[in-house]
Every structure is written in C-alpha cells, then in structure tokens.
Amino acid sequence: MSLKQPCRSGIISRYREHLPISNKTPLISLNEGSTPLLHSPKLSSLLSAHVYLKYEGLNPTCSFKDRGMTMAISKAVEEGAKRILCASTGNTSASAAAYAARAGMQCVVLLPAGRIATGKMIQAYLYGARVIAIQGNFDDALRLVRQLGERHDFVVVNSTNPYRLEGQKTAAFEIIEELGEAPHLHLLPVGNAGNITAYWRGYSEFYRLGISQRLPLMLGVEASGAAPLYHGAPMDHPETLATAIRIGQPASWHGAMKAIEESSGCFDIVSDEEILKAQQWLAREEGVFAEPASVVPVALLLKYASATNPSSLRTNAIFRKLPAHPTVVLTLTGHGLKDPETASHSISPPLEVAPTLQEVLAHL
Ligand code: F0G
C-alpha cells in the first residue's frame, strides 16, 4: 500500500481501502480529518518527551465526532435511511445534525437538559435537528435512544453504530503517517469510551499491516466525578464541569478495557479544578484553546510533572515502562469555543477606559 500525503478531502477518500465502504456508498463529507499534529514544546520539556497534540477541534463541526459521522451518515444513506437519531453530551449531536443536513436527512437528538455547552446546542439547532431535552443525564438519553432505535425506523448514530468507530480509527492512521511510527504513549479523554476503542483499533490495524512497528500504551483519562472505568464500576450520578464526558455507564466499556489491557495501559483521573487550570495553561503556554473535556490528558500530565509523590498516580507506572525521551500524543477532542461559559470562569471582564491615547497608555 502506498501512503498518501496528508490532504483535506475527508477521511473516506483518504482511507477508502481501510474502511467498510463500497463503490455504491455515497460520500457524505465535510472534508473532516487531516487535523494538525502540533508539537507541544512546553509539555515536551516538562516531561523530557516529544509531546504532540492531535487537534481534533479543527474538524468541520469542531470535534473528533466528524470522523465517525461521515461514515455513519454515508452508510445510512446507502441503506436508504431517512431519519437518524442520537443521544449526546453535545458534540455527537452537533456533528450528526451537520452531516444529516448535508445528506438531506431528518435528525433527532436527545440531550441531557441544562447540561449542554451553549455552542453545541446552537450547532444542533442551526443545522436543523429536532432537539429534545431529557430530564436526566446522558446515560438516560442513550437508554431511550436504544429503545427508539429498536422500535422505529431511525438509524442510531451513537458510537454503538459500528461505522462510527471505523471512521474514528482514522485519527490513529494520521498520527502514524505523520510521525512515521506509532507514539510510545497515547492519552485521550474517555466518556462513552468509543474513541479510545477506535484509536486502539486504528493503531492495531496499521501494526498488523506492518505500516507501524510498535503499538502505543493507551492512557484513558476520566474526570474524577465521572470515572466508572477508573473505578471499575458504572456510576449512577456522574458529575463534572467537563459536560462532554459526564457519563456513568460507557457504552463501549469492553472496547475501552480491551485497549487498556492489550496495550498494558491504564485509566487515570483529574479533578474539575485541574481541568480548568489545564485549559488556561494550554491556551496561555501553547496558544491552543480546547474544551474542558479535551484537556483532561493535559491536566493529567501537568499533575504528573509537578507531583511530589508521582508513584501515587497510576500514570507513574506507565511512564516507568517508556523509553527515555518517548513520543507522546494527546488527543484534543473538541474546540474551546464550544463552551464559552465554562472558560469564562477563568477570565475577568475587560477593563473599560475612556477612548484616549493617554487612558490606554495609563493601563498598559
Ligand atoms: N471529548 C469530547 C469533547 C467529547 O465530546 C467526548 C464525547 C469525549 C471526549 C469522550 O469520547 O465518548 O468516545 O469516550 N462526547 C459524546 C457526545 C459522548 O455525545 O458528544 P468518548
């Protein structure tokens, strides 16, 4: 197989031979994928490693979900579906609504009432989805979606749809192609656990094909108030300000466990306070604005780098398995502008001054 140069023509065009599509599959794409792999000088020096940020917030609807949605919607159109349905903490619904609009399909989204970041809610409405707010959490919404999907003619486009993870695995392909090899360690936030399952599939496939010579250790990071995988048991009342990963019963539990076990990785956690600090740190130190759920791996690395007793963290055992100066990749799953309210906790209102040069100079 000849590797293609990065281009922005959508993941189905770029990775056609690695995806379950045929000549009959229509291409519903917004030119997703081919996102930047940014070197992070500050994290690299803090950890004596080569650290890269896979900036998935630069996808068409500003999250990694677009990679899976181009597949799910293209296949739904191929199968003659007219309506799609999903539960979401915000990003899946934004992406589903956009790709449904592109395909001319009806889209229904079930969201936990009052717990969706503004930008994501606006996206779902603007792309024309029918939005239903559930008085419950994401796990309640997904349960209802599963029931509706069984009884009615909806195609469910949550990550329980097998095509979603097929699309999302392409992020691992891009990383291998850009680095020339898989990283030693890959960290990503975990909510419903589809993405960690998809990355592991992507890394494993390229390894089996001989395109990469190693497999990374996988480190899944949860918010401490919504950490079912870390604790090894589902949670009834998950709570975190990182609303995208406020999930207590991950649908891809087994896929996530497989990724951790097969890669000899682990799950670790960070607090909401650490998440907010990491969001600000990443913006100020690296010029990258990512939403709260996206920065949980950054928060974990900052905590690890500054820990007085690093052996108290599960992450410590992972770093001890790595060679000197390892290559480390973090996925930044969504753009910071999706959730302006949470980010606004970190800023003070701008200073207002009279419109004179003197006044402005006085406040520089
Ligand atoms: N980061 C962001 C920004 C997300 O929106 C999500 C999940 C995750 C991380 C976790 O990924 O679920 O594959 O483990 N968002 C889903 C949604 C649940 O509905 O948008 P995961």
Image (cartoon, rainbow, N blue to C red):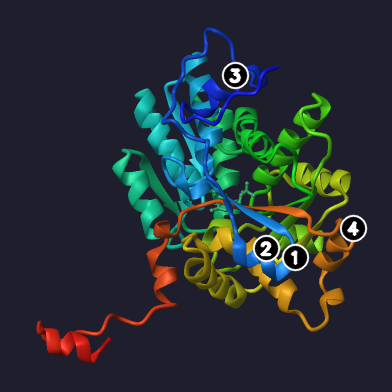
The amino acid type of the residue labelled 3 equals Arg
The picture quadrant where one finds residue 319 is: bottom right
Work out how far the residue at label 4 is from the one at label 3, CA to CA, in angstroms.
35 Å
Q: Tell us which disc is closer to us: 3 or 2.
A: 2
Work out how far the residue at label 4 is from the one at label 1, CA to CA, in angstroms.
14 Å
- The residue shown at (75%, 29%) is 206
Looking at marks 3 and 2 on the same chain, the residue that comes earlier in the sequence is marked by: 3
Name the residue beneath numbered marker 2. Answer: 44
- The residue shown at (75%, 38%) is 181
Residue 364 position, x and y percent, is 28, 86
Above or below 276: residue 217: above
Name the residue beneath numbered marker 3. Answer: 16
For this rendering, which residue is in front, 253 or 215? Answer: 215
| Residues at discs 1 and 2 in contact (Cβ within 8 Å) | yes
Work out how far the residue at label 1 is from the one at label 2, CA to CA, in angstroms.
6 Å
Looking at marks 4 and 1 on the same chain, the residue that comes earlier in the sequence is marked by: 1
Looking at marks 1 and 3 on the same chain, the residue that comes earlier in the sequence is marked by: 3
Helix, strand or loop at mark 2: helix
Helix, strand or loop at mark 4: loop
Residue 210 position, x and y percent, is 81, 26
The circle on residue 48 is 1
State the quadrant of the N terminus: top right
Name the residue beneath numbered marker 4. Answer: 321
